[in-house]
Amino acid sequence: ALDQLQLSAAGVPDMAALSDRLAPLTGWRVVPVAGLVADEVFFEHLANRRFPAGAFIRPEAELDYLQEPDIFHDIFGHAPMLAQPAFADFMEAYGKGGRRAMSRGQLHHLARLYWYTVEFGLIRSQADPGRLRIFGAGILSSPGESVFALEDKSPNRIAFNLERVMRTNYRIDDFQETYFVIDSFEQLLSVCYQDFGDVYDRLQGAGDLAPGSILPDDRLLHRGSGAYARASLTPKTAEAAHG
């Protein structure tokens, strides 16, 4: 996708030209925004296959971690993924589901799905299922977390389970304590093509989980040591509709 979208060329990408290359592949376009947009605006864009991308770039001091997504995060992290048909369909479905989640007061649960997939998701290598690859843009736009997510002994790596993900809080100020791993984009899409009404009903009776928690029925790919999280001075969790 990097080659198809011509993102290897030098310079700041032109979003209109990028959209003209992306639209024939999956029907998606990229629209510039000045910063984070309201939840209802964000969902409306996604539901209509438009991705809002930050039209600004991070300062050098925030190269490795930025809470507000900039053009590098959005264009080099998200845009190539939108050229993958199953992932593109998942993103549209997420946008449509967002409006329903807001009406039911379930946005915090849905936000965790986005966070642990679109932003911080891992996927099994199709060539070698024993190896993991990064697809989350939040990881991809951080040089340090790109190594940490795949190689460090500290974080948990757990096989994706929809309701488990939607119960799990996350870090917004540092590297993640847990990464969830999908088998394929088709798996992600098929699991999420369902009526979330029943899911929300079950989640209302279930408690939230700490970012580094491990449950007895988790399919653990790697049990983390938690060393990095313990060394952090100001651990935080937060709820957000998107990263």
Image: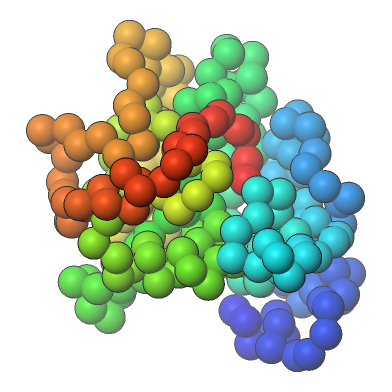
Quadrant hosting residue 239: top right
Q: Is residue 7 shown above or below 177?
A: below
Percent of width and height locating residue 17: 86, 76
Percent of width and height locating residue 201: 39, 12
Q: Which residue is at the far left? A: 216
Q: Is residue 14 shown above or below 228?
A: below
Q: Nearer the viewer, residue 21 or 148?
A: 148
Percent of width and height locating residue 107: 57, 24
Judged left or right of residue 59, residue 152 is: left
Q: Which residue is at the far bottom? A: 9
Q: Which residue is at the far top? A: 205
The structure residue drawn at horizontal position 60% and vertical position 33%, both measured from the top left corner, is 240
Screen quadrant of the C terminus? top right
The structure residue drawn at horizontal position 53% and vertical position 25%, both measured from the top left corner, is 108
Judged left or right of residue 64, residue 163 is: left
Q: Is residue 114 shown to the viewer in this render? A: no
Percent of width and height locating residue 25: 66, 71
The structure residue drawn at horizontal position 39% and vertical position 11%, both measured from the top left corner, is 204
Screen quadrant of the N terminus? bottom right
Judged left or right of residue 197, residue 205 is: left
